[in-house]
Image: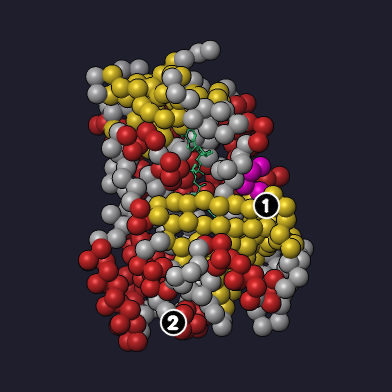
Amino acid sequence: MNNRYDVVIAGAGPAGGQCARDLAARGYDVVVLETESEDEFPRQSNKSTAGTFPSMMASFGVPDDVVMQYTDSVVLESPTDHYVREQPGAVLEFADFKRFLVEDSRADGAEYRFDARVTAPIMENGEIVGVRYNGDEEVYGDIVIDATGPAAPLAKKLGVVDLKRENHAIGIEYEFEGIDIDRPGFADLNDAMMLRLDHELAPGGYSWIFHTGEDTAKVGLCYIQNGGHKQYARDDFAIDDYLTHWLETDPRFRNATPLEGKQHRGSAHIQLPEKMHTDRFMAIGDTVPTVDPLWGEGINKCMQSGRAAAATADSCLKHGNLEPTAENLEVYDTLWHRDVAPNQRKRLLMTQMLYLAPNERYDKLMADLRRLDDDTLASANRGSIPAILSLLEPSDIPMLAQFAKERFSLDWFR
Ligand SMILES: Cc1cc2nc3c(=O)[nH]c(=O)nc-3n(C[C@H](O)[C@H](O)[C@H](O)COP(=O)(O)OP(=O)(O)OC[C@H]3O[C@@H](n4cnc5c(N)ncnc54)[C@H](O)[C@@H]3O)c2cc1C
């Protein structure tokens, strides 16, 4: 077995799979090590609701056959109101999508080793030259990339990332049939991705229903286990209890039954990365982490980070004499901040503020969203301060004061 590659990637998620696709298409020798076995892949890592948008599908050439349902709108729900925005999207079958990334990069020559659990970097003269997996097996590369999501075994050991416990977001989801998709009194969720702000169901986070056709949908919730969550959480509830509570109390689920084997759970860290590379090494996707903090859109962002790392590796490897030193890989961090997640700091602040707000404010927010024009909303979504201020009002002052207190005392997201 070949044991030397141009690039070694740990993890076959959206980030690692896309990075391998780009590198293999450019003719590099690339190997991806994936901890799960191939016959069941992905099982444990089949975690995502996989709602995405046409820009991602087009820029990465994702085929229609991994789409479960094309959607026409995004719906925001509060405890007693909702806001509908026309916006085309797609809910992917995440497992098919992951397998597509593997097959497509293989067609261009990428190699995959399944049942390969990466544990540690192999170091020489203070630089990573390869990785150790499954105990004592080794593989070597000019550049090594950690794309293992929150596991981050290489990035942590190299001191590149410091994923903090208090920034840990957890999510759980079931697929159901028999859902009342267009229930009187609620928004019509046919061909919609719905996100619900309601602390009774997802304290300090949000819950969702993503329509997957006829009377079926993906139903889940997530929250960051910090300030906003602690303020609104029930002592006796774990995340599964919140989902059960929603299923028992929302009439749309009265006749719903879970689809066998269609349960997903996972996590990500919601924090601002400091650096993402060192000599001969880059960390991509949710190892960094890269997921959008506000609404959890991670697939597009993580694939973009994989592409930025592939472009950076290409710029070193194509000139045989440009060593992939930390200095020469710095461009990856620049691309990440410029193209992948340009407003990450502002979006983290918006996230913190949004999930601190009380339920009554969410009801009012729906009316505010209807009041504002599309340009202002798009600016607010990008983190524009004047646009965000147009969404705030005097009664928000106590919440803003609490936000400021928590922000400066806990130094969240660092
Ligand atoms: C419940 C939930 C719902 C979500 N919904 C959406 C959504 O609707 N839309 C959206 O865009 N994003 C969504 N996301 C976010 C999105 O799924 C992630 O941001 C994205 O999957 C991260 O991609 P990644 O490649 O960085 O990491 P991962 O997807 O975590 O992939 C990492 C891969 O590395 C492998 N691995 C782990 N450890 C090792 C090891 N030691 N050695 C070798 N391999 C290893 C894993 O098996 C996995 O295959 C959701 C996330 C969750 C948890």
Instruction: Say whether residue 332 is left or right of residue 292.
Output: left
Closer to the camera in the image, 143 or 372: 143
Q: In the image, is residue 117 part of the stretch drawn in magenta?
A: no
| Amino acid carrying mark 1 in the image | Lys
Q: Is mark 2 within 8 Å of ligand 1?
A: no
Q: In the image, is residue 96 part of the stretch drawn in magenta?
A: yes
Q: Secondary structure at mark 2?
A: helix
Q: Is residue 204 in view from this perspective?
A: yes
Residue 307 x/y as whole percent: 46, 38
Query: Where are the magenta residues, as a range?
Result: 93-97
Q: Is residue 398 above or below residue 145?
A: below
* Disc number for residue 262: 1
Inter-mark Cα distance, 1 to 2? 34 Å
Q: Is residue 193 above or below residue 84?
A: above
Residue count near mark 1 (Cα–Cα under 10 Å), binned few <14, some 14–19, many ≥20: few
Q: Which residue is mark 2?
A: 361
Residue 182 x/y as whole percent: 72, 74
Q: Quadrant of residue 77?
A: bottom right
